[in-house]
Amino acid sequence: MKQCFQVHPADNVATLLEDAENEPLLVHGGEVPGTSIVATEAIALGHKIALRTIPADAPVIKYGVIIGIATVPIQAGQWVHLHNCRSRLDERSSHLDLHTGAAKDTVYE
């Protein structure tokens, strides 16, 4: 079984330790080590998976702290990234390219 890691018991996301797609992941760390979550889409190594449903406008929590705000409801097992969350500190974060993180409102030559 592939694996992910929940850094803090309060986290509602975990970090993938290997690529996964539509398969169960063993969750290490966190409040209940050894539980599992099913990745409901392709999620790359190092990216975040929602451990439970995160409502729109609710905090995304990693390291036991708020790292962003959900912009849409995020279901358990979904990839958590730029397409469904934003920074509380940087309004431009919702305008970044999904795969590169580059600002889409800036012309690069």
Image (tube, grey):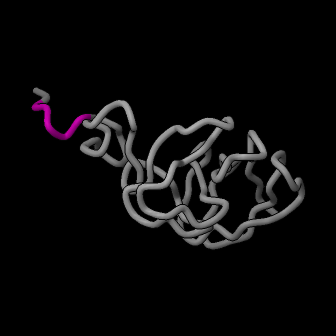
The x, y position of residue 62, in whole percent, is: 63, 41
Q: Nearer the viewer, residue 72 or 109?
A: 72
At horizontal 68% and vertical 37% (from top left) the residue drawn is 64
Quadrant location of the N terminus in the rendered image: bottom right
14, above or below 7, in the image: below
The question of residue 73 being in magenta is answered with no
80, above or below 78, in the image: above
Quadrant location of the C terminus in the rendered image: top left
Q: Quadrant of residue 50?
A: bottom right
Q: Nearer the viewer, residue 6 or 66?
A: 66
Side of 103 where 74 appears, left or right: right
The x, y position of residue 30, in whole percent, is: 81, 47
The question of residue 104 being in magenta is answered with yes
Side of 51 where 89 appears, left or right: left
Q: How many marks?
A: 0
At horizontal 60% and vertical 56% (from top left) the residue drawn is 49
Side of 54 where 84 appears, left or right: left
Q: Residue furthest front?
A: 58
The x, y position of residue 13, in whole percent, is: 63, 51
State which region is magenta. 103-107
